[in-house]
Image (cartoon, rainbow, N blue to C red):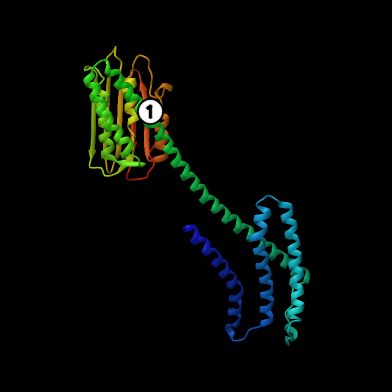
Amino acid sequence: MIFNIRKGIIPIIHVLFCIIILIVPLVIMSRNGTVEYWHYMGYFIRSGLLIALFYINYFILIDKLLFKKQFVMYIIINLGLILGTVFLQNLLFEIIMGPPPRKDFGQHMPKLPPQEMRILGDYVIIVFAIGMSVALKATMRWYKDSINLETVKAAQLEADLKNLRSQLNPHFLFNTLNNIYSLIAIDTEKAQESVHRLSNLLRYILYENNEKFVPIDRELEFTQNYIDLMRLRLRPDIKIDVLIKNDNCHYEIASLMFITLIENAFKHGINNGAESFINIKIFVDNKKGVLCTIENSLNDSKSTIDSKNSGIGLVNLRKRLELLYPHRHQFVVEEKDDRFSVLLCIDFANEKNIEE
Protein backbone atom coordinates (compact mmCIF):
# COMPACT_ATOMS: atom_id res chain seq x y z
CA MET A 1 0.00 0.00 0.00
CA ILE A 2 2.76 2.44 0.95
CA PHE A 3 4.74 1.62 -2.18
CA ASN A 4 1.66 2.19 -4.37
CA ILE A 5 1.13 5.62 -2.82
CA ARG A 6 4.76 6.52 -3.40
CA LYS A 7 4.56 5.38 -7.02
CA GLY A 8 1.60 7.71 -7.51
CA ILE A 9 3.25 10.69 -5.82
CA ILE A 10 6.58 10.55 -7.67
CA PRO A 11 5.15 11.36 -11.16
CA ILE A 12 3.20 14.27 -9.64
CA ILE A 13 6.42 15.61 -8.11
CA HIS A 14 8.16 15.45 -11.50
CA VAL A 15 5.31 17.29 -13.21
CA LEU A 16 5.26 20.00 -10.53
CA PHE A 17 9.03 20.35 -10.86
CA CYS A 18 8.77 20.99 -14.61
CA ILE A 19 5.91 23.46 -14.15
CA ILE A 20 7.85 25.39 -11.52
CA ILE A 21 10.98 25.54 -13.70
CA LEU A 22 9.06 26.81 -16.74
CA ILE A 23 6.30 28.98 -15.24
CA VAL A 24 7.80 30.69 -12.19
CA PRO A 25 10.29 32.81 -14.23
CA LEU A 26 7.37 34.06 -16.37
CA VAL A 27 5.48 35.11 -13.22
CA ILE A 28 8.55 36.91 -11.90
CA MET A 29 9.12 38.72 -15.22
CA SER A 30 5.49 39.96 -15.29
CA ARG A 31 5.58 41.62 -11.87
CA ASN A 32 6.38 45.05 -13.31
CA GLY A 33 3.45 44.84 -15.71
CA THR A 34 5.41 44.09 -18.86
CA VAL A 35 6.94 40.86 -20.02
CA GLU A 36 9.93 40.67 -22.34
CA TYR A 37 8.78 37.61 -24.19
CA TRP A 38 11.96 37.44 -26.25
CA HIS A 39 14.03 36.88 -23.12
CA TYR A 40 11.50 34.43 -21.70
CA MET A 41 11.37 32.48 -24.96
CA GLY A 42 15.12 32.04 -24.81
CA TYR A 43 14.83 30.80 -21.24
CA PHE A 44 11.94 28.48 -22.20
CA ILE A 45 13.87 26.86 -25.06
CA ARG A 46 17.02 26.39 -23.00
CA SER A 47 15.16 25.03 -19.95
CA GLY A 48 12.92 22.77 -22.05
CA LEU A 49 15.92 21.14 -23.71
CA LEU A 50 17.66 20.69 -20.35
CA ILE A 51 14.54 19.05 -18.90
CA ALA A 52 14.30 16.74 -21.92
CA LEU A 53 17.97 15.77 -21.56
CA PHE A 54 17.49 15.26 -17.80
CA TYR A 55 14.60 12.82 -18.26
CA ILE A 56 16.19 10.96 -21.20
CA ASN A 57 18.95 10.10 -18.78
CA TYR A 58 16.65 9.56 -15.80
CA PHE A 59 14.17 7.19 -17.46
CA ILE A 60 16.26 5.51 -20.18
CA LEU A 61 20.04 5.84 -20.28
CA ILE A 62 20.87 5.43 -16.59
CA ASP A 63 18.81 2.23 -16.24
CA LYS A 64 19.73 0.76 -19.63
CA LEU A 65 23.43 1.64 -19.67
CA LEU A 66 24.91 3.19 -16.53
CA PHE A 67 23.44 0.77 -13.99
CA LYS A 68 24.38 -2.12 -16.29
CA LYS A 69 28.00 -0.88 -16.28
CA GLN A 70 28.05 0.02 -19.97
CA PHE A 71 29.99 3.18 -19.16
CA VAL A 72 31.62 3.78 -22.55
CA MET A 73 28.33 3.58 -24.42
CA TYR A 74 26.68 5.82 -21.82
CA ILE A 75 29.36 8.50 -22.21
CA ILE A 76 29.30 8.33 -26.02
CA ILE A 77 25.52 8.70 -26.21
CA ASN A 78 25.56 11.60 -23.74
CA LEU A 79 28.32 13.36 -25.67
CA GLY A 80 26.13 13.06 -28.76
CA LEU A 81 23.12 14.38 -26.84
CA ILE A 82 25.13 17.32 -25.48
CA LEU A 83 26.33 18.34 -28.94
CA GLY A 84 22.84 17.82 -30.35
CA THR A 85 21.27 19.88 -27.56
CA VAL A 86 23.60 22.84 -28.14
CA PHE A 87 23.03 22.66 -31.90
CA LEU A 88 19.25 22.38 -31.52
CA GLN A 89 19.20 25.23 -29.01
CA ASN A 90 21.01 27.58 -31.39
CA LEU A 91 18.84 26.46 -34.30
CA LEU A 92 15.62 27.13 -32.38
CA PHE A 93 16.92 30.52 -31.31
CA GLU A 94 17.43 31.49 -34.96
CA ILE A 95 14.18 30.01 -36.30
CA ILE A 96 11.72 30.93 -33.53
CA MET A 97 13.20 33.99 -31.93
CA GLY A 98 15.18 35.68 -34.63
CA PRO A 99 17.44 38.59 -33.75
CA PRO A 100 16.88 40.31 -30.38
CA PRO A 101 14.67 43.43 -30.34
CA ARG A 102 16.78 46.59 -30.66
CA LYS A 103 16.61 49.23 -27.98
CA ASP A 104 18.24 52.61 -27.93
CA PHE A 105 20.76 52.10 -25.18
CA GLY A 106 23.14 54.69 -26.55
CA GLN A 107 26.51 54.42 -24.97
CA HIS A 108 25.05 52.24 -22.20
CA MET A 109 24.41 49.25 -24.48
CA PRO A 110 25.17 46.16 -22.33
CA LYS A 111 28.17 44.22 -23.48
CA LEU A 112 27.51 40.53 -23.97
CA PRO A 113 30.17 38.00 -22.93
CA PRO A 114 32.27 36.48 -25.72
CA GLN A 115 30.54 33.79 -27.75
CA GLU A 116 33.09 31.19 -26.65
CA MET A 117 32.21 31.84 -23.00
CA ARG A 118 28.49 31.59 -23.70
CA ILE A 119 28.93 28.27 -25.52
CA LEU A 120 31.14 26.97 -22.71
CA GLY A 121 28.46 28.05 -20.20
CA ASP A 122 25.84 26.13 -22.15
CA TYR A 123 27.96 22.97 -22.00
CA VAL A 124 28.58 23.36 -18.28
CA ILE A 125 24.85 23.74 -17.57
CA ILE A 126 24.01 20.70 -19.71
CA VAL A 127 26.61 18.53 -17.98
CA PHE A 128 25.29 19.76 -14.62
CA ALA A 129 21.75 18.70 -15.62
CA ILE A 130 23.01 15.22 -16.55
CA GLY A 131 24.91 14.98 -13.27
CA MET A 132 21.78 15.93 -11.31
CA SER A 133 19.86 13.24 -13.17
CA VAL A 134 22.45 10.60 -12.25
CA ALA A 135 22.57 11.78 -8.62
CA LEU A 136 18.78 11.70 -8.22
CA LYS A 137 18.43 8.31 -9.91
CA ALA A 138 21.23 6.81 -7.84
CA THR A 139 19.64 8.16 -4.65
CA MET A 140 16.25 6.70 -5.56
CA ARG A 141 17.85 3.35 -6.34
CA TRP A 142 19.78 3.36 -3.07
CA TYR A 143 16.57 4.11 -1.15
CA LYS A 144 14.69 1.34 -2.94
CA ASP A 145 17.52 -1.13 -2.36
CA SER A 146 17.67 -0.20 1.33
CA ILE A 147 13.91 -0.85 1.67
CA ASN A 148 14.28 -4.19 -0.10
CA LEU A 149 17.26 -5.07 2.10
CA GLU A 150 15.27 -4.36 5.26
CA THR A 151 12.44 -6.53 3.91
CA VAL A 152 14.86 -9.36 3.19
CA LYS A 153 16.44 -9.00 6.64
CA ALA A 154 13.02 -9.13 8.31
CA ALA A 155 12.10 -12.25 6.31
CA GLN A 156 15.43 -13.86 7.16
CA LEU A 157 14.98 -12.99 10.81
CA GLU A 158 11.57 -14.68 10.87
CA ALA A 159 12.96 -17.71 9.05
CA ASP A 160 15.86 -17.98 11.50
CA LEU A 161 13.54 -17.82 14.49
CA LYS A 162 11.25 -20.48 13.05
CA ASN A 163 14.25 -22.68 12.34
CA LEU A 164 15.59 -22.29 15.88
CA ARG A 165 12.21 -23.10 17.42
CA SER A 166 11.78 -26.12 15.15
CA GLN A 167 15.12 -27.40 16.48
CA LEU A 168 14.24 -26.64 20.09
CA ASN A 169 10.92 -28.43 20.37
CA PRO A 170 12.12 -31.90 19.24
CA HIS A 171 15.26 -31.49 21.35
CA PHE A 172 13.16 -30.80 24.44
CA LEU A 173 10.87 -33.73 23.67
CA PHE A 174 13.68 -36.24 23.18
CA ASN A 175 15.40 -35.33 26.43
CA THR A 176 12.16 -35.51 28.40
CA LEU A 177 11.30 -38.90 26.93
CA ASN A 178 14.75 -40.13 27.95
CA ASN A 179 14.02 -39.04 31.51
CA ILE A 180 10.70 -40.92 31.53
CA TYR A 181 12.36 -43.98 30.04
CA SER A 182 14.87 -44.05 32.89
CA LEU A 183 12.00 -43.88 35.42
CA ILE A 184 10.04 -46.81 34.02
CA ALA A 185 12.42 -49.40 35.44
CA ILE A 186 12.84 -47.54 38.76
CA ASP A 187 9.40 -46.22 39.70
CA THR A 188 6.37 -46.99 37.58
CA GLU A 189 4.14 -44.55 39.46
CA LYS A 190 6.54 -41.67 38.87
CA ALA A 191 6.84 -42.65 35.24
CA GLN A 192 3.04 -42.45 34.86
CA GLU A 193 3.02 -39.06 36.58
CA SER A 194 5.79 -37.93 34.25
CA VAL A 195 3.76 -38.91 31.19
CA HIS A 196 0.83 -36.86 32.51
CA ARG A 197 3.07 -33.83 33.11
CA LEU A 198 4.66 -34.28 29.70
CA SER A 199 1.26 -34.23 28.02
CA ASN A 200 0.55 -30.85 29.63
CA LEU A 201 3.91 -29.51 28.53
CA LEU A 202 3.42 -30.73 24.98
CA ARG A 203 -0.01 -29.10 24.89
CA TYR A 204 1.68 -25.80 25.68
CA ILE A 205 4.42 -26.33 23.10
CA LEU A 206 2.14 -27.46 20.29
CA TYR A 207 -0.93 -25.28 20.79
CA GLU A 208 -0.26 -22.37 23.11
CA ASN A 209 3.11 -20.97 22.06
CA ASN A 210 2.85 -20.83 18.29
CA GLU A 211 3.36 -17.10 18.44
CA LYS A 212 6.83 -15.60 18.63
CA PHE A 213 6.06 -14.16 22.08
CA VAL A 214 3.87 -15.52 24.87
CA PRO A 215 2.58 -14.05 28.16
CA ILE A 216 5.31 -14.15 30.77
CA ASP A 217 3.10 -15.81 33.39
CA ARG A 218 2.33 -18.73 31.04
CA GLU A 219 6.01 -19.15 30.24
CA LEU A 220 6.93 -19.17 33.92
CA GLU A 221 4.20 -21.72 34.64
CA PHE A 222 5.53 -23.93 31.87
CA THR A 223 9.06 -23.55 33.25
CA GLN A 224 7.97 -24.54 36.75
CA ASN A 225 6.12 -27.61 35.41
CA TYR A 226 9.19 -28.61 33.45
CA ILE A 227 11.39 -28.35 36.57
CA ASP A 228 8.89 -30.45 38.51
CA LEU A 229 9.00 -33.06 35.77
CA MET A 230 12.79 -33.17 35.85
CA ARG A 231 12.81 -33.54 39.65
CA LEU A 232 10.95 -36.85 39.48
CA ARG A 233 13.99 -38.88 38.47
CA LEU A 234 16.38 -37.35 41.03
CA ARG A 235 17.54 -38.82 44.32
CA PRO A 236 16.12 -37.18 47.46
CA ASP A 237 19.58 -36.04 48.62
CA ILE A 238 20.18 -33.89 45.51
CA LYS A 239 19.63 -30.24 46.42
CA ILE A 240 17.26 -28.45 44.07
CA ASP A 241 16.55 -24.83 45.00
CA VAL A 242 13.99 -23.11 42.79
CA LEU A 243 12.56 -19.61 43.14
CA ILE A 244 10.37 -18.20 40.36
CA LYS A 245 8.70 -14.86 41.04
CA ASN A 246 6.57 -12.67 38.79
CA ASP A 247 5.96 -9.18 40.16
CA ASN A 248 2.76 -8.54 38.15
CA CYS A 249 4.69 -8.24 34.91
CA HIS A 250 2.38 -7.80 31.91
CA TYR A 251 5.00 -8.11 29.16
CA GLU A 252 5.40 -11.04 26.80
CA ILE A 253 8.59 -13.04 26.34
CA ALA A 254 10.00 -15.30 23.67
CA SER A 255 8.69 -18.81 24.23
CA LEU A 256 10.91 -21.54 25.70
CA MET A 257 13.53 -18.97 26.70
CA PHE A 258 14.66 -20.67 29.95
CA ILE A 259 14.30 -24.33 29.05
CA THR A 260 17.70 -24.77 27.40
CA LEU A 261 19.54 -23.49 30.47
CA ILE A 262 17.44 -25.51 32.92
CA GLU A 263 17.72 -28.64 30.81
CA ASN A 264 21.51 -28.39 30.68
CA ALA A 265 21.70 -27.69 34.42
CA PHE A 266 19.93 -30.99 35.11
CA LYS A 267 21.97 -32.80 32.48
CA HIS A 268 25.43 -31.62 33.57
CA GLY A 269 24.80 -30.71 37.21
CA ILE A 270 23.82 -34.10 38.53
CA ASN A 271 26.45 -36.64 39.59
CA ASN A 272 25.07 -39.86 41.04
CA GLY A 273 28.29 -40.56 42.85
CA ALA A 274 28.83 -37.18 44.52
CA GLU A 275 27.00 -34.33 46.16
CA SER A 276 25.11 -32.30 43.55
CA PHE A 277 23.02 -29.17 43.52
CA ILE A 278 21.01 -26.94 41.18
CA ASN A 279 19.93 -23.39 42.07
CA ILE A 280 17.41 -21.72 39.77
CA LYS A 281 16.15 -18.17 40.35
CA ILE A 282 13.94 -16.25 37.93
CA PHE A 283 12.61 -12.78 38.80
CA VAL A 284 10.34 -10.82 36.47
CA ASP A 285 9.43 -7.16 36.87
CA ASN A 286 7.84 -4.56 34.59
CA LYS A 287 10.64 -2.04 35.08
CA LYS A 288 13.64 -4.31 35.61
CA GLY A 289 12.66 -6.97 33.09
CA VAL A 290 13.92 -10.53 33.51
CA LEU A 291 16.71 -11.64 35.83
CA CYS A 292 17.52 -15.33 35.57
CA THR A 293 20.41 -16.97 37.42
CA ILE A 294 21.18 -20.68 37.29
CA GLU A 295 24.01 -22.33 39.17
CA ASN A 296 24.78 -26.01 39.24
CA SER A 297 27.51 -28.43 40.23
CA LEU A 298 29.52 -30.17 37.53
CA ASN A 299 29.63 -33.92 37.17
CA ASP A 300 32.84 -35.91 36.87
CA SER A 301 33.01 -35.62 33.10
CA LYS A 302 33.31 -31.84 33.44
CA SER A 303 30.85 -31.43 30.60
CA THR A 304 29.76 -27.86 30.34
CA ILE A 305 26.74 -26.33 28.81
CA ASP A 306 28.88 -25.40 25.81
CA SER A 307 29.94 -28.96 25.01
CA LYS A 308 29.10 -30.52 21.65
CA ASN A 309 27.03 -33.17 23.40
CA SER A 310 24.69 -30.60 24.95
CA GLY A 311 22.63 -30.29 21.79
CA ILE A 312 21.41 -26.85 20.89
CA GLY A 313 22.71 -25.32 24.11
CA LEU A 314 24.19 -21.86 24.12
CA VAL A 315 24.48 -21.63 20.35
CA ASN A 316 20.71 -21.67 19.94
CA LEU A 317 20.03 -19.44 22.92
CA ARG A 318 22.60 -16.84 21.91
CA LYS A 319 21.12 -16.68 18.41
CA ARG A 320 17.61 -16.26 19.75
CA LEU A 321 18.70 -13.46 22.09
CA GLU A 322 20.56 -11.66 19.33
CA LEU A 323 17.59 -11.91 16.98
CA LEU A 324 14.84 -11.10 19.46
CA TYR A 325 16.53 -8.77 21.96
CA PRO A 326 19.38 -6.99 20.18
CA HIS A 327 21.16 -4.59 22.60
CA ARG A 328 18.53 -5.41 25.21
CA HIS A 329 19.99 -8.44 26.91
CA GLN A 330 22.94 -9.61 28.98
CA PHE A 331 24.11 -13.20 28.84
CA VAL A 332 27.07 -14.31 30.96
CA VAL A 333 28.31 -17.88 31.29
CA GLU A 334 30.98 -18.76 33.84
CA GLU A 335 32.64 -21.97 34.99
CA LYS A 336 34.63 -22.05 38.24
CA ASP A 337 36.15 -25.16 39.72
CA ASP A 338 33.25 -27.50 40.45
CA ARG A 339 30.33 -25.25 39.58
CA PHE A 340 28.76 -23.69 36.52
CA SER A 341 26.70 -20.46 36.52
CA VAL A 342 24.61 -18.55 34.02
CA LEU A 343 23.23 -15.00 34.20
CA LEU A 344 20.50 -13.91 31.79
CA CYS A 345 18.96 -10.42 31.84
CA ILE A 346 16.35 -9.13 29.41
CA ASP A 347 15.21 -5.52 29.36
CA PHE A 348 11.53 -5.23 28.41
CA ALA A 349 10.75 -1.57 28.94
CA ASN A 350 13.70 0.29 27.41
CA GLU A 351 15.71 -0.44 24.31
CA LYS A 352 18.92 0.69 25.94
CA ASN A 353 22.27 -0.94 25.56
CA ILE A 354 23.27 -3.48 28.18
CA GLU A 355 26.94 -4.33 28.31
CA GLU A 356 27.53 -7.98 27.59
Total labels: the figure holds 1
Name of the residue lying farthest toward the bottom: 104
Q: Can residue 281 be seen in the rendering of this structure? A: no
Which residue is denoted by mark 1 in the rendering?
171
Q: Can residue 29 be seen in the rendering of this structure? A: yes
- Left or right: 242 in relation to 98: left
Label 1's element?
helix
- Left or right: 24 in relation to 87: left
The image position of residue 53, as x and y in percent, is 68, 65
The image position of residue 245, as x and y in percent, is 23, 35
The image position of residue 343, as x and y in percent, is 33, 31
Give the quarter of the figure containing the C terminus: top left
Name of the residue lying farthest toward the top: 273
Quarter holding residue 26: bottom right
* Residue 118 in the image: above or below residue 143: below
- Left or right: 185 in relation to 79: left
Q: Residues within 10 Å of mark 1 (few under 14, many from 20)?
A: some
The image position of residue 260, as x and y in percent, is 35, 29
* Residue 170 in the image: above or below residue 304: below
Residue at the image point whose x is 64% and y is 55% from the top = 63
Quarter holding residue 239: top left
Q: Amino acid at mark 1?
A: His
* Residue 88 in the image: above or below residue 127: below
Quarter holding residue 248: top left
Pick the residue in front: 298 or 128. Answer: 298
* Residue 124 in the image: above or below residue 138: below
Residue at the image point whose x is 33% and y is 36% from the top = 206
Pick the residue in front: 312 or 57. Answer: 312
Residue at the image point whose x is 75% and y is 57% from the top = 76
Pick the residue in front: 301 or 2. Answer: 2
Pick the residue in front: 306 or 232. Answer: 232
